[in-house]
Image: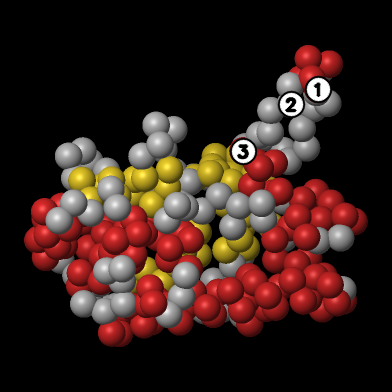
């Protein structure tokens, strides 16, 4: 069962940053916010359009479990600066299936801007910093500037590609294959070099549309053959390439291999 509760967004510092000191110019440190912008679709926008979008952006911080979008809400788009966000579908009985995970430097909400409301919800898996973008401005730019319209079309194509993989895994994959896919989707490299999926067994069970005991058995099997370690709260991926071979859609698309950040 997805637990949701109203939360107050923490308003963060404006997007603009102060001019660096001479010492900082010698050894510049890129902020997480700027790093996310540089690695996002926004970096390909023409400079005037990018400055307009960022000038209207609202930086906020939200705790884990917060809902960013419910199916049918007004269009909303955000750039993930830090943290992990997911888009999911839910059933009347409370079961949920995750269709996409969104990390730092990725946009979420472009399909809503282009095509209108969607029957999905967007939730923060971890505490996150986001840049809320002006949906009306993005829509206007996409309609009036050919280059931005094409960039948005490319983003939609990538989302469709992701959806194909998610549908294939959920429709044709066994529970083991679905768990493997979601572990790869969630994996991130820690400072100590370990590849870790920061997820509890309960959240993982909800993501694959199963129960915690069933997922625990699958993790036990994967642990026995040396693919994962569950010694801590997190799930460490010991052999991501072999784990990738456990997914149904792995042979169709390199996407899940890429998302493991190998």
Left or right: 17 as drawn, with respect to 168:
right
- For this rendering, which residue is in front, 149 or 130? 149
The alpha-carbon separation of the residues under discs 1 and 2 comes to 5 Å
Callout 1 crowding tier (Cα within 10 Å): few <14, some 14–19, many ≥20: few
Farthest residue toward the right? Answer: 48
Q: Which residue is tagged 2?
A: 28
Between discs 3 and 1, the one toward the N terminus: 1
State the residue at coordinates (20%, 46%): 229
Q: Which residue is tagged 1?
A: 25
Say what secondary structure mark 3 lies in: helix
State the residue at coordinates (11%, 54%): 224
Say what secondary structure mark 2 lies in: loop
Left or right: 33 as drawn, with respect to 246:
right
The alpha-carbon separation of the residues under discs 3 and 1 comes to 17 Å
Tag 1–tag 2 contact (CB < 8 Å): yes
Left or right: 218 as drawn, with respect to 188:
left
Callout 2 crowding tier (Cα within 10 Å): few <14, some 14–19, many ≥20: few
**Residue 205: % across, % down:** 22, 63
**Residue 185: % across, % down:** 40, 60
Q: Which residue is tagged 3?
A: 32
State the residue at coordinates (40%, 36%): 193
State the residue at coordinates (77%, 76%): 150
Say what secondary structure mark 1 lies in: helix
Judged by depth in the image, the label closer to the viewer, 3 or 2, is 2
């Amino acid at each position: 069962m997805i637990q949701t509760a109203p939360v107050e967004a923490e308003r963060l510092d404006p997007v603009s940053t102060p001019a660096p000191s001479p010492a900082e110019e010698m050894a510049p440190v890129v902020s997480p916010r700027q790093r996310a912008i540089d690695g996002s679709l926004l970096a390909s926008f023409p400079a005037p359009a990018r400055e307009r979008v960022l000038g209207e952006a609202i930086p906020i911080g939200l705790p884990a479990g917060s809902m960013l979008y419910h199916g049918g809400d007004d269009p909303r788009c955000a750039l993930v600066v830090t943290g992990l966000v997911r888009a999911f579908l839910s059933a009347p009985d409370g079961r949920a299936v995750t269709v996409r995970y969104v990390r730092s430097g990725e946009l979420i909400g472009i399909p809503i801007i282009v095509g209108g409301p969607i029957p999905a919800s967007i939730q923060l898996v971890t505490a996150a910093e986001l840049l809320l973008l002006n949906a009306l401005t993005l829509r206007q730019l996409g309609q009036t500037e050919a280059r931005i319209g094409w960039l948005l079309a490319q983003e939609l194509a990538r989302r469709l590609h992701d959806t194909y993989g998610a549908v294939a895994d959920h429709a044709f994959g066994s529970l083991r294959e679905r768990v493997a896919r979601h572990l790869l989707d969630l994996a991130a490299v820690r400072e100590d070099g370990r590849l870790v999926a920061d997820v509890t067994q309960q959240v993982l069970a909800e993501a694959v549309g199963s129960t915690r005991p069933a997922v625990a058995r699958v993790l036990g099997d994967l642990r026995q053959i040396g693919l994962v370690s569950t010694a801590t709260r997190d799930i460490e991926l010991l052999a991501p390439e072999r784990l990738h071979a456990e997914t149904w859609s792995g042979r169709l698309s390199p996407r899940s291999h890429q998302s493991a950040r190998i």
